[in-house]
Each structure stands twice: as structure tokens, then as C-alpha cells.
Image (cartoon, rainbow, N blue to C red):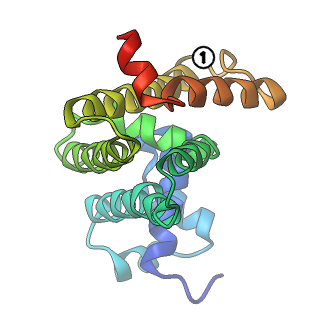
């Protein structure tokens, strides 16, 4: 039995369960078994299942948005910053599953506000990158929306038909195509072709 279990361990186990089976998969007894502890450990850290779900949502937001932005914020060139954030965003299968599950559950009053806040943070980050490329504010907002919609659409496709997306080298080519489409080499050329 694990002795030094903390609330973060429970939140991570909840995220794993959500990625595998949706929000309904967050159940105290199966998580306790998976963690090798009693239910008493859960109640030491959380008042109820909803408190654990809130901790899991907070951890997801921190890991998959706040931390990702922090990882790329030091990159001065906005084009390279976008390339890196797209690589990171497409690198984790669990992140994609979690984002898809949470987006699908956004009508749940426990989940919706977090999903909305995450979307706003991600769109704002993308907007700042596109504005730094030289796009006017409204153009930058449209490009940010286009990029985020492409990301969310890819996640939905992965959820709807996991075999639809390529794997291995073909996946790398798909990501390259997305980056070429979403990160224009020259803002003026884009403006002239519009």
C-alpha cells in the first residue's frame, strides 16, 4: 500500500480515468484500488467526488494550458512559438482525450466554466502569436480561431474514429500540413490573396 499519497496523486488518477472512460469513470473505489489505498485516503484529501473532479479539472488546466504556454513563452520568434505549441498540443494522446471529454461535457456546470476559461486562454495565446506575426487585431483573432478550431476538430476526429488519423510518419506529415496551413510564411502574401 502506498503511504505518501497526496491530493495531486488522486487528481492525476482521476484524469487517467477520465481519459479512459469519461467523467463517469471518476469513482472513489476503483481509483483507490488503482492507487493501492483505501477509500479513507480519498476522504483525507477530498470531501466528495465533485471536489476530486474540480481538482482534476484544475490539474488539466494547469498541465495542458498554463504549463504549455509557459514552455513556449521564452521563444521570441512568434512563428517558432506557434510551431512548438502545435507540436506540444499534438504530442499527447491523453491530452487529446481529456480535451475531447471535457469539451463534450461542457454543459455540465462543474466542467463548462473550466472549458470556457481554457478555450479563452488558448485563443488569447494564439491571438498574441498571430498579432506578433504582423496581423491586424481582427485578422489575428480570425487566425487564432482557425488554428484552435483545427486543433479541436482534430481531437474530435480522433475521438469519433481513432483510425481516421494517420500514425507514425504519416501523422508527422499531417502535423506538418497543419502547421503550413496555420502558420503563414508571409503575412503580406496572405493579405494580397484574401
Tag 1: Cα neighbours inside 10 Å, few (<14), some, or many (≥20)?
few
- Location of the N terminus by quadrant is bottom right
Residue 13, how many percent across, how many down? 53, 62
Q: Is residue 98 left or right of residue 106?
A: right
Choose top left, top right, bottom left or bottom right for residue 153.
top left
Q: Residue at x 60, y 69 (%)?
A: 35
Looking at the figure, which quarter contains the C terminus? top left
Say whether residue 96 is left or right of residue 147.
right
- Viewer-nearest residue: 162 or 69: 69
Using the image, determine if residue 110 lies above or below residue 51.
above
* 42 w.r.t. 181: above or below: below
* Residue 5 image point, x, y percent: 53, 82
Relative to 151, residue 25 above or below: below
Q: Is residue 163 left or right of residue 47?
A: right
Q: Nearer the viewer, residue 28 or 190?
A: 190
Q: Residue furthest bottom?
A: 3
Q: Residue at x 42, y 29 (%)?
A: 187
User: Circle 1 sits on which residue?
Assistant: 161
The residue at the far right in this view is 169
Q: Is residue 117 above or below residue 59?
A: above
**Is residue 43 left or right of 177 when viewed as pictured?**
left
Q: Position of residue 169 (x, y in %)?
A: 83, 29
Residue in view at x 54 percent, y 22 percent = 181
Quarter residue 126 falls in? top left
Amino acid at each position: 500500500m502506498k503511504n505518501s499519497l497526496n491530493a495531486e496523486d488522486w487528481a492525476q488518477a482521476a484524469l487517467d480515468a477520465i481519459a479512459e472512460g469519461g467523467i463517469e469513470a471518476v469513482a472513489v473505489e476503483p481509483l483507490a484500488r488503482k492507487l493501492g489505498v483505501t477509500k479513507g485516503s480519498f476522504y483525507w484529501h477530498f470531501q466528495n467526488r465533485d471536489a476530486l473532479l474540480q481538482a482534476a479539472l484544475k490539474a488539466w488546466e494547469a498541465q495542458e494550458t498554463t504549463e504549455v504556454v509557459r514552455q513556449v513563452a521564452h521563444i521570441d520568434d512568434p512563428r517558432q512559438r506557434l510551431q512548438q505549441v502545435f507540436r506540444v498540443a499534438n504530442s499527447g494522446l491523453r491530452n487529446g482525450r481529456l480535451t475531447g471529454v471535457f469539451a463534450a461535457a461542457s454543459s455540465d456546470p462543474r466542467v463548462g466554466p473550466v472549458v470556457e476559461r481554457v478555450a479563452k486562454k488558448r485563443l488569447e495565446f494564439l491571438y498574441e502569436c498571430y498579432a506578433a506575426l504582423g496581423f491586424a487585431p481582427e485578422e489575428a483573432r480570425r487566425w487564432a480561431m482557425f488554428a484552435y478550431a483545427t486543433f479541436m476538430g482534430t481531437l474530435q476526429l480522433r475521438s469519433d474514429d481513432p483510425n481516421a488519423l494517420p500514425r507514425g510518419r504519416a501523422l508527422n506529415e499531417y502535423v506538418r500540413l497543419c502547421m503550413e496551413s496555420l502558420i503563414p510564411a508571409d503575412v503580406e502574401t496572405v493579405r494580397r490573396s484574401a
